Amino acid sequence: MATFLAGTVKGQGRAVDVGCGNGQLTCQLADHFTTVVGIDSSEDQIAHATPHRHVEYVCAPAERLPLAVRSVHLIAAAQAAHWFDRSAFYREARRIAAEGAVIALVSYGVLQLEPAELQARFATFYTDEIGPYWPPERKLVDGGYAGIEFPFEEMAYPDMNIERAWDFGEFLGYLSTWSAVRRVNEAGRDDILDIFVRDLSDIWGDPMKKRPVSWPIKMRLGRI
């Protein structure tokens, strides 16, 4: 994905990753740009972001980017734009955009498992069982930000996926990071999780067996 995004811009001097979190995309972009700035409003995220010699991390809100006028070639935001005041963020994007700059709102679609029997049980869990515990903004992410305002010259992008191979423990570790899972626990509905884990374990088989896991990458991509 970072290689594709770098190829969309005329200059590769500076990129900014807004709402950078732990710096996952930030560091990937650093392999393609002279400098990358990772920006997040959370001091804790910035304090624990992955270091990289071409990356500078700054704690600041998306609506007040501490960057000079016409100084950035790529403005990216991965899994973060649904939290922004987007009108203010878009104004800032236009202010800092160099000639020919590109803005990319990236989202990772719903996790996909193989084989089909695993995916079917997971889909029921995600949509019907745990669905009510997601914050409303989650729908924007799952829909690839398709329903939000995006006042830029829209660009096409190729099909892309994030692909991993996980054993059962790794999958459960990922699941435990979900805000919806925390909300289920706080609501005293551990039974939802217990039944799902039991069912999935039966289908998974050997817990050490690696299973394919993937996420489709979705974007709103535009020329500023």
Image (cartoon, rainbow, N blue to C red):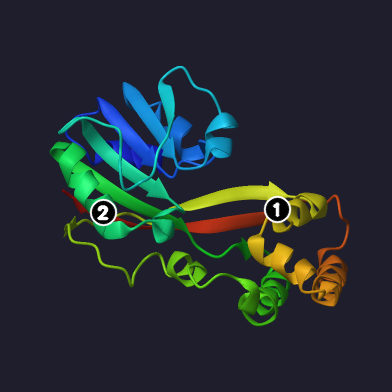
Give the residue type that dot 1 points to.
Tyr
Secondary structure found at label 1: helix
State the residue at coordinates (83%, 68%).
197
Q: Is residue 97 above or below residue 71?
A: below
Q: Position of residue 72 (x, y in %)?
A: 23, 33
Task: Determine whether, in the image, residue 137 is placed left or right of residue 17.
Answer: right
State the CA–CA distance, disc 2 to disc 1. 33 Å
Question: In the figure, residue 6 lies in which quadrant?
Answer: top left
| Residue 128 against residue 98 in the figure, above or below | below
Q: Is residue 210 left or right of residue 138?
A: right
- Location of residue 212 in the rendering, given as x and y in whole percent from the top left corner: 66, 55
User: What is the x, y in percent for residue 53?
Assistant: 46, 17
Vertical relation: 123 (above or below) 20: below
Judging by the rendered image, the residue that carries numbered circle 1 is 174
- Decide which of tag 2 and tag 1 comes sooner along the chain: 2
Q: Residue furthest top?
A: 53
- Residue at 70% of width from left, 80% of height from top? 129
- Give the residue type that dot 2 points to: Ala
Pick the front one: 5 or 60: 60
Instruction: Determine which residue is flagged by label 2.
Output: 88
Q: Is residue 25 above or below residue 116?
A: above
